[in-house]
């Protein structure tokens, strides 16, 4: 009787669990089958669906940008208005010489040509806008509207770059949506381009196009677009060593005859791009003037607001040592020059630590890049180019000279391409994206913009969390079903497969949660407690805390990315 009863219980318990598991597996199988059938049927229709969905994302972001037209804008607004006036009012040989405004033209020639084209339309809207003398600090509604709309229209280049990445690779719908959320709805791009005012979306669109061609194996086209990008904004040259090593190894290293032909073609393409950009200035004998404008090394080591990079810790260490030594009675002189000169001036001095020169920062960037370049040479995988390029821009951000906080977009946007590759990539990107966006908060310092930037960051964090959870919960579901098939009896004794699904999905761990809580503490102190407790005393402390705290995550991210590159490629 005991054996019969025990056997009956053993039959009932696995039977009930097995029935639940079969029902669950059937629903998952049906969902996956319908999804696969939908992907396999009518590829033309799928392409149309992808395009329409992406346009929907872009339309929503455009509506937000239109609502932000009356918001705050920085001196960069006057910088670009002055460039419109320079390129419209002066002959080409005067563009890089004019000093009517302190905001002189200091971007490469393709961007100057771009401003020249825009100036024709600006003249039709308001002629005073492009007047070199009368237009100084001109901020009429017509100017604001024209410049804001020009940035929105130029974001179509970013849209096309994302579209190329979405349509050409074997991405599921959730992976595509994830990329659109991370790039098209990037709060950092909204803050920098559509409030603070710049054209990063347009330039990052060119970078995304270049990466998409490299990932397709169309190396020549990828190199061509990158050369074009460098002639629009020279700060993207940080990734040039990555492009050089990758194209040399993957495209040109094909034997002596074939390799020589390919390197000749690649060299001719790049030379043609640079000739089109700089040729007129070579003709006028102005290359030295153009280069001096593009690389004003007389500016300070750091920008006006210290970007969260390695040099923050170096400067703090220098100031801390000087303070302690003065307390000990030593005569330590106080440096007169600023670390944060925005205009050209003397290089930044240090009281204790060795002086930092532009050459020092250049060598440090190359040293940080060197392990990645070795990996590229050994194994040039097209699918890894986005990760390598993002790592290069992070090296430039951490160790470069006079780095702007806005340059964090150069590595955050390309990393969105690989953010969905694994759960580890997703956790890393989630924290890095939040920190990058938060580090931009000091750019919008007026009270009326505070709710906007906070809402943008919170909304984007929620959307990221939802997108990552949807992607990786599905992965956990599939793994749980496979595990249930292989270990039916063990699962039947311990619980159904749905129990395993509940334990999967996206999470950042307790360290990530603690760091995010610390970010909240920094913001509460700077925005509320510091003004209440200290008033106008030590006004630099809130900015310093933001810079140091964000630098901790970005330094960790740099180490994490280097480890991923060394291990996974």
Image: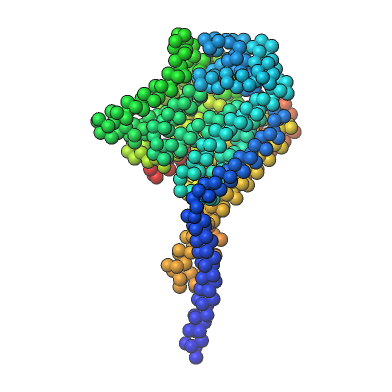
Q: What residue do we see at 65% from left, 44% from top? A: 459
In this orientation, which residue lies closer to the viewer: 357 or 261? 261
Quick one: quadrant of the C terminus? top left
Q: What residue do we see at 57% from left, 18% from top? A: 116
User: How many labels, in total?
Assistant: 0
In this orientation, which residue lies closer to the viewer: 466 or 141? 141
* Residue 114 against residue 456 in the figure, above or below: above
Quarter occupied by residue 531: top right
Q: What residue do we see at 60% from left, 35% from top? A: 188
Q: What residue do we see at 64% from left, 31% from top? A: 194
Q: Is residue 547 left or right of residue 70?
A: left
The color scheme shown is rainbow
Q: Residue furthest left?
A: 256
Return the x and y of residue 535 as percentages of the image width and height.
Answer: 74, 29
Task: For residue 349, say whether it is visible.
Answer: no
Return the x and y of residue 237 as percentages of the image width and height.
Answer: 45, 26
Return the x and y of residue 563 as percentages of the image width and height.
Answer: 42, 41
Task: For residue 311, say whether it is visible.
Answer: yes
Q: Is residue 511 left or right of residue 141?
A: left
Q: Residue furthest bottom?
A: 1
Quarter occupied by residue 517: top right
Return the x and y of residue 142 as percentages of the image width and height.
Answer: 71, 23
In this orientation, which residue lies closer to the viewer: 146 or 75? 146
């Amino acid at each position: 009787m005991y054996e019969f009863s025990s056997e009956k219980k053993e039959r009932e318990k696995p039977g009930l669990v097995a029935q639940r598991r079969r029902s669950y597996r059937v629903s998952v199988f049906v969902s996956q089958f319908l999804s696969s059938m939908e992907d396999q049927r009518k590829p033309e229709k799928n392409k149309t669906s992808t395009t329409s969905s992406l346009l929907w994302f872009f339309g929503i972001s455009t509506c937000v940008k239109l609502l932000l037209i009356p918001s705050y804008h920085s001196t960069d607004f006057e910088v670009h208005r002055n460039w419109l006036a320079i390129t419209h009012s002066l002959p080409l040989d005067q563009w890089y010489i004019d000093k009517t405004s302190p905001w002189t033209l200091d971007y490469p020639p393709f961007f100057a040509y771009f401003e020249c084209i825009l100036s024709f339309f600006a003249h039709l809207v308001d002629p005073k806008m492009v007047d070199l003398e009368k237009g100084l600090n001109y901020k009429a509604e017509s100017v604001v509207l024209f410049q804001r709309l020009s940035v929105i229209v130029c974001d179509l280049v970013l849209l096309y770059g994302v579209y190329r990445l979405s349509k050409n690779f074997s991405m599921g719908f959730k992976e595509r949506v994830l990329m659109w959320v991370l790039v098209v709805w990037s709060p950092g791009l909204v803050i920098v381009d559509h409030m603070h005012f710049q054209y990063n979306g347009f330039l990052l669109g060119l970078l995304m196009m270049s990466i998409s061609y490299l990932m397709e194996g169309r190396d020549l086209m990828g190199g061509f677009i990158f050369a074009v990008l460098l002639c629009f904004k020279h700060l993207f040259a940080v990734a040039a060593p990555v492009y050089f090593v990758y194209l040399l190894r993957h495209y040109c290293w094909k034997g002596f005859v074939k390799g020589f032909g390919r390197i000749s073609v690649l060299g001719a393409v790049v030379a043609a791009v640079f000739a089109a950009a700089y040729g007129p200035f070579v003709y006028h004998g102005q290359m030295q003037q153009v280069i001096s404008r593009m690389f004003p090394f007389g500016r300070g080591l750091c920008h006006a607001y210290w970007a969260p990079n390695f040099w923050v810790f170096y400067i703090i260490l220098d100031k801390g040592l000087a303070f302690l030594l003065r307390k000990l009675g030593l005569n330590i002189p106080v440096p007169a020059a600023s670390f944060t000169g925005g205009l050209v001036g003397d290089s930044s001095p240090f009281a204790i630590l060795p002086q930092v020169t532009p050459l020092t920062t250049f060598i440090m960037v190359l040293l940080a890049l060197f392990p990645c370049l070795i990996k590229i040479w050994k194994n040039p995988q097209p699918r890894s180019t986005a990760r390598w390029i993002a790592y290069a821009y992070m090296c430039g951000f951490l160790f470069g000279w006079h780095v702007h906080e806005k340059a964090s977009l150069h590595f955050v946007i390309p990393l969105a391409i690989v953010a969905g590759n694994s759960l580890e990539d997703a956790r890393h990107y989630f924290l890095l994206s939040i920190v990058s966006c938060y580090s931009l908060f000091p750019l919008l310092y007026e009270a009326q913009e505070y709710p906007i930037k906070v809402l943008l960051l919170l909304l984007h964090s929620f959307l990221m969390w939802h997108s990552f959870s949807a992607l990786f919960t599905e992965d956990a579901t599939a793994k749980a079903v496979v595990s249930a098939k292989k270990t039916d009896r063990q699962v039947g004794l311990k619980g159904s497969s749905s129990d395993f699904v509940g334990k999967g999905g996206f999470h950042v761990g307790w360290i990530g949660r603690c760091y995010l809580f610390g970010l909240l503490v920094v913001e509460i102190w700077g925005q509320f407690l510091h003004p209440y407790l200290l008033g106008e005393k030590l006004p630099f402390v809130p900015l310093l805390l933001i810079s140091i705290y964000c630098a901790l995550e970005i330094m960790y991210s740099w180490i994490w990315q280097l480890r991923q590159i060394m291990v996974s490629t």
